[in-house]
Each structure stands twice: as C-alpha cells, then as structure tokens.
Image (cartoon, helix red, strand yellow):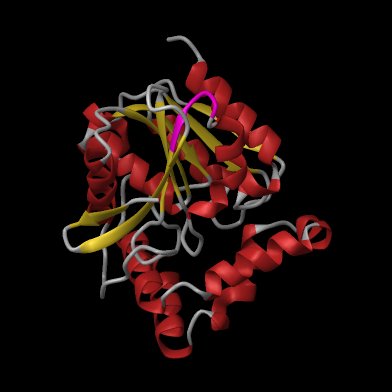
C-alpha cells in the first residue's frame, strides 16, 4: 500500500491485479475512503490493474487545511498515476470521485481512457448547503452530520437489511478529519462543470440511483446530455449505488470497460 506525495500531502494508495492488465482507478465519495470499492476491487482485480486511493482529507491520506478545489483533487489523481507509471487509465468515480473524473477528462484527457461517472453532478444544486456543512463539522465534528448523511446515502430498505454495512460506513465517516472533509466540501461547493464537460471526448458511462436525493437522476441526465455519446444506467439504489447494488454496478462497469469501440 504505497503512499504518494501530492505537493506535500501524502495520498494513500492501494493497487491490486496484474501489472500488465488494463488499469482502472477508483475514486471515493465525500466522507468515505478507498474501501467503499472493496466489492468492485475483488470482482475486477483478475482482469484489471485496480488502483484505489483515499482522496485528500479522507482515510489514510493527509488532511491539510482547506479550502480545496476540484483542480487540486484532480492534480492529486495525476500524481498517483504518475508515481505508478500509468500513462492512461479507465476512471470510475462516485459523487466527488465522479466530479474529479470530469475535471480530469477535461484538463488531462490524455490520461483517461474510459470514464465512469456514478451518482454525481456537474454542479451542486444547493451550494449554500455546503457552507452549513462546513460550519457544522468545524464546530461540532463529524458525529453532528453522520446520521443525516447516511440517510441520504442508502435507502431505508438497505438500512434495515444491511446494518453491519451501515455501521461500517458510519464509523468511516466519523473518523474523517473535519478539516479535510470541509476542504472537500468547498471544492464541491465551488465547482461548476456544466458547460465544460461538453469538451469530454472519452467514452462515458453515467450511473444514477433511482432513489438518490443527493445527486438525482436529473443531474445524471444533464451530464449525459452534455457529453457526446454518453450512456445512462439507472440502478435501484440511493447515493452509494456501488454498495447498495454491487452486482449490478460492477456488471455495468465491467461490460462498459471491456466493450470494444
């Protein structure tokens, strides 16, 4: 599990799978870490070189004082790819990870082969909400928002039948450094990629959750309408669709990444 320096901030990285296999990099959502992709990594590591990392402010990566920007998060990912000697990779990001992927596909397109954008948006529907979130975690810590956020992440049915998973994700969230979480909130708040994503040329799959109130299907539809040739897949899930519907999510991603042009 290497640690990569991103302009003074350590970024925690995990790599699995054959060195010669096609690389795919997974980027986590706000408030999680690279382990949100455990089920996808297990399923794909025999056919792909699976690269996961903790976004700055999360997991075992550093959490310098913010605010951060989407450019900063994108450049962190480029540092990971460069340090691993990866010249071109598939990208799969969920929520914040998808936002980072959009930035990369626009500003560093030579590094991106195929692009999976899951449960994400080109612009936050309510930027002021992030100011409230920033003030709350800075003043009261992550416990103050944990239950509200978990209610957005997963459907009520999943909460009822997957209590151990919910507990694990809650523990991960409350362990996030508030300073790092707030820094990433600022990056999401300040982002507007609605028009810029029209420049993306990478083959793109957009995944949405039918019950996602954080980044609703309408946000996915906007992305699809702007990126030429993008395809939309809707899953019976809320925000963290890869965890709520892992077989369907993984199958959609694998088929898309292996599809011949």
Q: Position of residue 171 (x, y in %)?
A: 60, 71
Magenta residues, start to end = 46-50
On the rendered structure, is 78 left or right of 202? left
Q: Position of residue 237 (x, y in %)?
A: 69, 47
Can you name the residue that lies furthest to the bottom here? 139
Nearest the viewer among 122 and 87 is 87
Can the viewer see residue 196 in this picture?
no
Q: Residue at x 67, y 40 (%)?
A: 246
Question: The C terminus lies in which quarter of the figure?
Answer: top left
Q: Position of residue 128 (x, y in %)?
A: 40, 71
Can you name the residue that lies furthest to the top here? 260
Compared with 123, 159 (above or below) is below
- Dominant secondary structure, magenta: loop
Q: Quadrant of residue 7?
A: bottom left
Can the viewer see residue 235 in this picture?
yes
Q: Position of residue 125 (x, y in %)?
A: 45, 58
Q: Quadrant of residue 251?
A: top right
Q: Residue at x 52, y 22 (%)?
A: 256
Compared with 93, 185 (above or below) is below
Q: Residue at x 55, y 57 (%)?
A: 214
Compared with 54, 37 (above or below) is above
Compared with 54, 103 (above or below) is above
Q: Residue at x 26, y 70 (%)?
A: 67
Is 136 in the magenta? no
Nearest the viewer among 77 and 222 is 77
């Amino acid at each position: 599990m290497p640690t990569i320096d991103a302009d003074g901030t350590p970024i925690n990285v995990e790599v699995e799978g054959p060195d010669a296999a096609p690389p795919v990099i997974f980027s986590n959502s706000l408030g999680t870490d690279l382990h949100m992709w455990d089920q996808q990594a297990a399923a794909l590591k025999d056919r792909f070189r699976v690269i996961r990392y903790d976004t700055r402010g999360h997991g075992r990566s550093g959490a310098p004082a913010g605010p951060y920007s989407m450019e900063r998060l994108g450049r962190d990912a480029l540092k990971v790819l460069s340090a691993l000697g990866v010249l071109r990779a598939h990208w799969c990001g969920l929520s914040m990870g998808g936002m980072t992927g959009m930035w990369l596909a626009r500003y560093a397109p030579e590094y991106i082969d195929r692009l999976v954008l899951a449960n994400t948006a080109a612009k936050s529907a309510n930027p002021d909400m992030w100011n409230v979130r920033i003030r709350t975690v800075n003043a009261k810590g992550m416990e103050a928002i944990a239950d509200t956020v978990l209610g957005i992440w997963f459907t009520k049915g999943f909460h009822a039948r997957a209590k151990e998973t919910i507990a694990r994700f809650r523990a991960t969230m409350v362990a996030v450094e508030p300073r790092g979480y707030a820094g990433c909130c600022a990056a999401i708040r300040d982002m507007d990629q609605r028009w810029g994503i029209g420049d993306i040329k990478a083959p793109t799959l957009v995944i949405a959750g039918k019950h996602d109130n954080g980044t609703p299907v309408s946000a996915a539809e906007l992305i699809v309408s702007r990126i030429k040739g993008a395809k939309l897949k809707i899953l019976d899930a809320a925000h963290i669709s890869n965890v709520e519907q892992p077989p369907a999510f993984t199958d959609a991603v694998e088929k898309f990444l292996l599809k011949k042009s």
